[in-house]
Amino acid sequence: MSNLKRIGVVLLVIAAVALVAGSFKGSDVLDRAIILGIGIDAEENGGVLMTAEVVAPGNGTEQVGTFSKTVSVKGETVNVALQNVAEVTGKEASLGQCVVLVLGQKYVENVDFSDLTEYFINHHSFKESAVICCCEGSAKDLFNKGNALTQSMSLAIATALLDQAEKLSVTNNSLLQYARSQNELNCTGFLNRVAFVASDNTDSSLPEKELGYITYREMCVFRANKYITSLSEQDVKGMSLFLPDTYGETFVSFEDTVTRTVQVTNKDVKLKAGKDGIEAEINITVRYGRTDSEEVSGALTSKNDKEIPQKLLDDVTKQAKAIAEKYLAKQIEYNFDLLKFHEMYRRQEGTSVSLAERPMSEFPVKLTVTVTES
Amino acid sequence: MDKNRVQVGQLALLYLLLVMGGKFLTLPSLLAGDVGHDSWLSVAFSFVWDGICLCFLLWAVKMNSDSHLDLSAILEKSVSKPVTKLLLIIFFVIFILRINVLLSSCYKMFSVTFDVSTNWIVYVLPIAALSFFAVAKGFNAIARMGQLLFGLILLAVVALFVSPLLEVEFGALKPLGEAGWDKILLTSYTRSFWFSDYIFIYFVLDGIKVKKTVFTPILISFAVGAFLCILLNAVFVALFGYLAPDFDMAMSKIGVFSAASTTNGRWDWLTLSIWLISVFIKVMVFIFCAYKCIEKFVGSNFVKFNWIAAGIILLTLSLPLFVSTEQLLGTVIKWGVIPFTLVQYVLPLLMPLCTKAAKRKTEVNNE
């Protein structure tokens, strides 16, 4: 090949590469409003108030960490509200990094939000593994408490529900799990209820600053994206006893003047669906809890390295059985199925309309609880 | 001839990449739409047929190892020239359709998952250019590229799999055969278009260097590839339940369950991009085969790169501009299943006989 031909080929390749590269339309990260979390509240006229926590990247190298701001916009639908976020921020709303979707109390209790669930589950960018939860009060107020946590509210909620919940015997929910629960068999599922709790500010340099933390020990139950009831902390504790993957429940026993706390360290749960109902065997392993257990409102409890007496184990067994039965009664009362009894029968009998329509009262539970020391 | 030489080890690695590339795009959602949570059984049955046919084809490869006859020589000497031409046309159509389906699925993935949009022609041109460059360099170049990238791609697939694997409850796949065994078997046949990736071996028959064994490495690759595909389908339907038929980009959906992606960025996008290389390698292999189909059809060996053959293939890559993938799958591929069966499932079974007959004829002619 002559030199002239070589130069010609090189020029041709450069032109082709430039043409191809120029034809791919991507978008610059600075042209995007990267949304970390979305809050949805009900609007009086039937629309939604969307609060988005948007990452605000620094222009220099001085800023370290995640800097975010919240933007609240109204819209007739979620899609319109998202477009309004783009209008307010002047950037295209990007949902690829969104980790949490928080639904306000008024919204979940009064609105059938099937459209919203369907919108996000079918959204190509929104991750199905993102956390979905509801909150006490409005989602807008919750997102604006980010400063009080001294970190991003979205990341705080996602980390808490994904990483810590299991250790505190609170089940967590992804958008996928929730969406499936509302459309399959009994069509019931739950959302964790997040609440902000203000705490005293002892920082003398910033005495006006609001401080606090978030809790997530209660739940709301939904059927086909409509609110049914709420589960108290005790109910959630009862439910978690049936879930082998959650642990960390604490039980408090009062004996004469001594208060003792034991903590669940391991759990073996066997659920068997039979003709006469469900057989549930829960074997929990406990050890003495910390001396400053929250269960006794911060009061010091007696720590003991000795063997746990049988009397204490019996007491824990009684307590565990009582809260588990209370939870089961609530399942029947409101006809919701968070323990997936219908699914257990589906795996045996196959999918059918008659199975999906069977009320929870047709699944009596024979419960056995045993407690041993670890 | 030498540039198309390939060792059995290279062939095995390339075959594994081909099995894994492309089956994790639209196929899982289509199968879920057909037979629900039993889709993995349908995939398993498809692989059983594939395994049987592959064994026969490898038998033919072994028989051919000392004579190095190419596909058209074997067929012309055993089943006549007109039948050979007919089979080559079927091969050409199947390769072109598979290339188009793969490319349009990737195109969709780029635009919806990575939010990168372009027009079809600009998207196809660089891929076609790379493929034709590989064709010009010979099959050995593609095989060596597969060999180089194999480890990286396999790691990416494993990384994409691990997290969802921990999330999934395999009990959700019960009861087995709920969709009905006849329906599962029928689905495995009607969706066979996505399977029998071994068909590329037909076009490198004359270049395979068989030293010791041909069966073990390729069958191991096949087993690993089949296992991963069945597992992915099982994970996909167990994880997404009633939503599975609506999620047409299985791999990008499964990737979001990477634990690290939840609050520490999108690790899944990186692994997904690496996995996509296997799809492009598959496209390159099929373009090589389509080019060979034209070469064998006109009955001459292209000593130099043939621009007309390349032009014909390039023209056929504009198919998605006129017909959507859904239309393609709903009509052409639906009705094409029967003729495709000839080259996918009947021909491999006859290949040892054909090879034996062709070898005998060659020996007689030489004498």
Image (spheres, grey):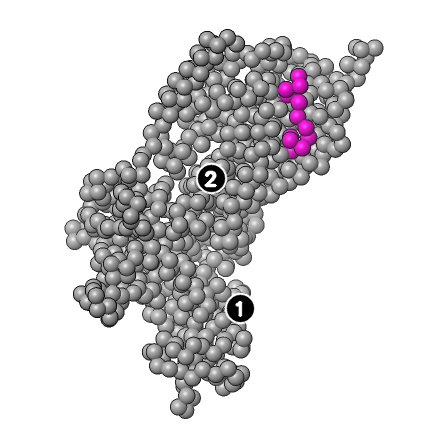
The residue that appears at 49% across and 50% down in the rendered structure is B163
- Residue linked to disc 1: A268
Q: Is residue B13 magenta?
A: no
What secondary structure predominates along the stretch shown in magenta?
helix
The residue that appears at 25% across and 61% down in the rendered structure is A148
In which quadrant of the rendered image does the C terminus of chain A lie? bottom right
Whether residue B38 is visible here, answered yes or no, is no
Q: Say whether residue A247 is left or right of residue A117.
A: right
Q: Chain of mark 1?
A: A
Amino acid residing under circle 2: Leu
Q: Position of residue B230 (x, y in %)?
A: 57, 43
Residue B187, numbered label: none
Whether residue B212 is visible here, answered yes or no, is yes
Residue pushed farthest right?
A: B367
Q: Is residue B7 magenta?
A: yes
- Residue linked to disc 2: B272
Neighbor class of circle 1 (other Cα within 10 Å; few <14, some 14-19, many 20+) is some
Q: Give the CA separation, mark 2 to mark 1.
A: 37 Å
Labels 2, 1: front one: 2
Q: Is residue A253 above or below residue B36?
A: below
Q: Is residue B346 above or below residue B273?
A: above
Q: Chain of mark 2?
A: B
Question: Which is more toward the observer, B74 or A12?
Answer: A12
Question: Which span is picked out in magenta?
Answer: B1-12
Amino acid residing under circle 1: Asp
Neighbor class of circle 2 (other Cα within 10 Å; few <14, some 14-19, many 20+) is many
Q: Say whether residue A349 is left or right of residue A249.
A: right
Residue pushed farthest left?
A: A45
Which element is circle 2 on? helix
The residue that appears at 60% across and 32% down in the rendered structure is B147
